[in-house]
Image: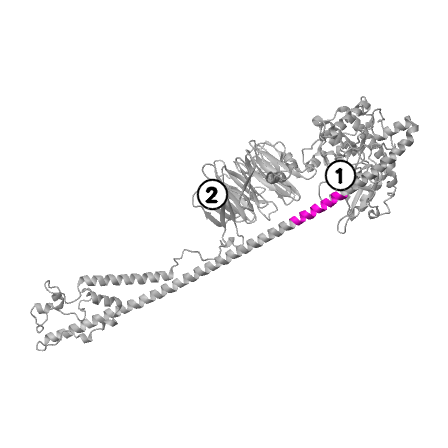
Amino acid sequence: MSSKFYCFSLCVCTFADMKLCSLQDPAGIFELVELVGNGTYGQVYKGRHVKTGQLAAIKCMDVTGEEEEEIKAEINMLKKYSHHRNIATYYGAFIKKNPLGVDDQLWLVMEFCGAGSVTDLIKNTKGNSLREDWTAYISREILRGLTHLHLHKVIHRDIKGQNVLLTENAEVKLVDFGVSAQLDRTVSRRNTFIGTPYWMAPEVIACDENPDATYDYKSDLWSLGITAIEMAEGAPPLCDMHPMRALFLIPRNPLSGEKPQPAHLKHPFIRELPNERQSRIQLKDHIDRTKKKRDETEYEYSGSEEEEEEHDMGEPSSIINIPGESTLRRDFLRLQLANKERSEAMRRQQQEQQQNEGHKHQLLAERQKRIEEQKEQRRRLEEQQRNERDLRKKLEREQRHRYEEQLRREEERRQAEREQEYKRKQVEEQRQAERLQRQLQQERAYLVSLQQQQQQQQQQQQQQDSRPAEKKQLYHYKDAVNLSDKPAWAKEVGKTEIRLKLTFFPSLQLPGQRLGHSESNGFAGHGNLPDLVQQSHSPSGTPTGLNSQHLDSMDELLRQEQAKLNEARKISVVNVNPTNIRPHSDTPEIRKYKKRFNSEILCAALWGVNLLVGTENGLMLLDRSGQGKVYNLITRRRFQQMDVLEGLNVLVTISGKKNKLRVYYLSWLRNRILHNDPEVEKKQGWITVGDLEGCIHYKVVKYERIKFLVIALKNSVEIYAWAPKPYHKFMAFKSFTELQHRPQLVDLTVEEGQRLKVIYGSSVGFHVIDVDSGSPYDIYIPSHIQSSVSPHAIVVLPKTDGMEMLLCYEDEGVYVNTYGRITKDVVLQWGEMPTSVAYIHSNQIMGWGEKAIEIRSVETGHLDGVFMHKRAQRLKFLCERNDKVFFASVRSGGSSQVFFMTLNRNSLMNW
């Protein structure tokens, strides 16, 4: 096979004096067939040589200017030292030109190994363990390849099962020697994890910590030993630990003190390999059996029936051709040796085959072109549909905006009408009050005039009585007040002959009324008139003045008029319109969703705009973007705590009867609603974090670019850390067991950006564990509480470098630092015992009690606001984002509802 590639590998001579951009473009020379793996440094494709149709492995990597010199040095190393039977042969390098603004792509063309890697072989073997003779055979072949490299002063630096490939003929090939070290240096400047540290030798790890440390070829032998353990046990040591923790533990492992044994090829395990040929045949048969059912892995290669044997450029291999092998190349050689007369026919057949291959390639190219056209059409259609969808959404938003604007204007118009009507009523009421006031004044003036007239008449009567000879008329009607000048009520009084009360007006008499009782008593109008008051009380005569009944009616009428006047005055200053005409309030508001959950809500987390709700009976999604519809995602499983990490595409939960820590993939949960990806439905949608059971509480803490997961269990605290691809999971970092106090609440702080410390609350108080030393100590024990303590929250105060915190327990909160010293002479005191306490990112802390919700400043503990309940109820904090806080209520029977509170931060201080 390699002889056919020499023709196009001549373009790669020496890279010392040339630039990568001057390399030939692979168009017309190689074509990509399919993606077979996603490597750490690029993607690996199965490729095909256009002219010959032979297969090759093509690694595609993006190249930046700062990496060019290092990559050129590595390519020279590959070209010089890859021609060995146990090293995958390097055939050439090309540069795929990309448009401006996009980095060019480097294509490294290598020998194709169709059986995949040793790691793939282990995963597809029952028990994830290789037989001992297979392990010995593979180890010997790796040693031969390393011997070739070490003789040329080259250290591989990255021996592991993933970098040991197998051909379909069970030949062992090393790949990626030297490249990993260069790429490690490149990415180290980016401060990210690259590669896998589990196979690294202690001296290699020491170089990262100490620039003066060095290492030699023995580091490859350490990695080979770890690879042998991987083949025997299915995984390297410490593989369950986070890579950072493994880097810390490997140099401190007692095995690192052993001296490497020389002459490993003479080791009994290698030298006494039993029945090598039989082991190789069995390994090849196993590869053939597992080839079809092999799962896709990081580097997965498909086999090739056209693979040829390369020329021996190094130490001879113990693998010899055996009868029965059915590769096309060996059949061709056997037929050629057996019958020379048929060579010409075979040559013609080969030419026809090449023509057929050319025709086949042409058909494939046409098919590929049609596929690309279909993809382009589909892309355009999708783009058109997306544009239409965006336009439709835009029109809907505009229509909604217009509708809301119309509603707002209508409300403003109604508000203006209400205000105008209110002002009009005020003016009318004011006018009525003034009119009543004037009327009352007129009535009082009229009564005074009547009294004065009566007094004058009495004086005249007395004068007439003193002169009996003179007979004058008793009343002078011409001097009487004109009835037309009387007030309305006085006219009515005149008609009904109502008189004022004598005790109030003792000498008042209405004009025009005749005193008939004087004639009946025999005075005939010419004698002295007795006392008027006494005369009026004679039982037999008609009353001469105003009687008591009429005066009582007059008094009642006056009281009614005065009451009307007082009512008018009252109306003029008090708003009796119940409509609120004030502008929209800036105070916080609470709303609730109509959906009533049948079981108790235990936790919730925001996923985009929607709300994931965990209950006693399952996991649901509350659609907040639509009509509030609820989707059932998982049933018959209890969810105690959850957090959505959208950047990692996972949902972290404590769930199940055994309170396991499970991590659900958001793509799987999304497909539970949409059902648009059958491939996702076939996969398991969650994994467990370690083998942890009985989890009580956890907290996700981000430190630089690492997400730590600190977990409280029954008698211990575990720390896990997120490991990116290729792991993509939480891996063990550190464990603290046999704690004196059982943790109920846990958090993690980073002191001054350097020291990690675990803070946890128990029934006794609050405690700290130094992550580096593992030593625990108490930071606050409330000695004034004799019974057990209920810890509510641990709040690491902002702008304190992780040194100070607010510890909330029972109905109190204290400010301490990580060494247990009280930092503020302030005790946060809740108005009642809260059932739930939470820190919100407006730099406030909220407490939910049975009678009220309190909002306090996290810095001072001062009360910022209170929401009083209409009735006592139990509330529980769920989650918060920006200015929205979600919480749930639990009623009798276990039913729950979700509430959310909107906090206007700009006006909260004025609330």
Q: Secondary structure at mark 2?
A: loop
Q: Residue 676 at x, y = what percent?
A: 63, 40
Above/below status of 464 relative to 869: below
How far apart marks 2 and 1 lie (CA) works out to: 61 Å
Using residue 256 as the reference point, say whether residue 604 is left or right of it: left
The residue located at (63%, 33%) in the rendering is 690
Foreground of the two, 286 or 218: 286
Question: Can you see residue 313?
Answer: no
* 513 on left or right of 848: left
User: Percent from the top left, x then y, of residue 26?
Assistant: 82, 44
Q: Which residues are magenta?
A: 369-385
Where residue 34 is drawn, which disc sits there? Answer: 1
Kindly identify the residue that appears in the image at 8 percent across and 77 percent down.
469
Where disc 1 sits, the SS reads strand
Q: Pick the residue in front: 822 or 343.
A: 343
* Mark before the other along the chain sequence, 2 or 1: 1
Q: Is residue 437 left or right of residue 179?
A: left
Residue 201 image point, x, y percent: 75, 34
Q: Which residue is mark 2?
A: 849
Residue 857 part of the magenta-drawn span? no
Seen in the image, is 482 located left or right of residue 71?
left
Amino acid carrying label 2: it is: Gly
Residue 638: x percent and y percent? 54, 34
Q: Is residue 373 magenta?
A: yes
Of residue 235 and residue 547, the one placed in the foreground of this image is 547
Q: Amino acid at mark 1?
A: Glu
Number of marks in picture: 2
Dot 2 and dot 1 residues touching (CB under 8 Å): no
Q: Main secondary structure of the magenta part?
A: helix
Mark 1, other Cα within 10 Å: few <14 / some 14–19 / many ≥20: few
Above or below, comparing residue 729 to residue 513 in the picture = above
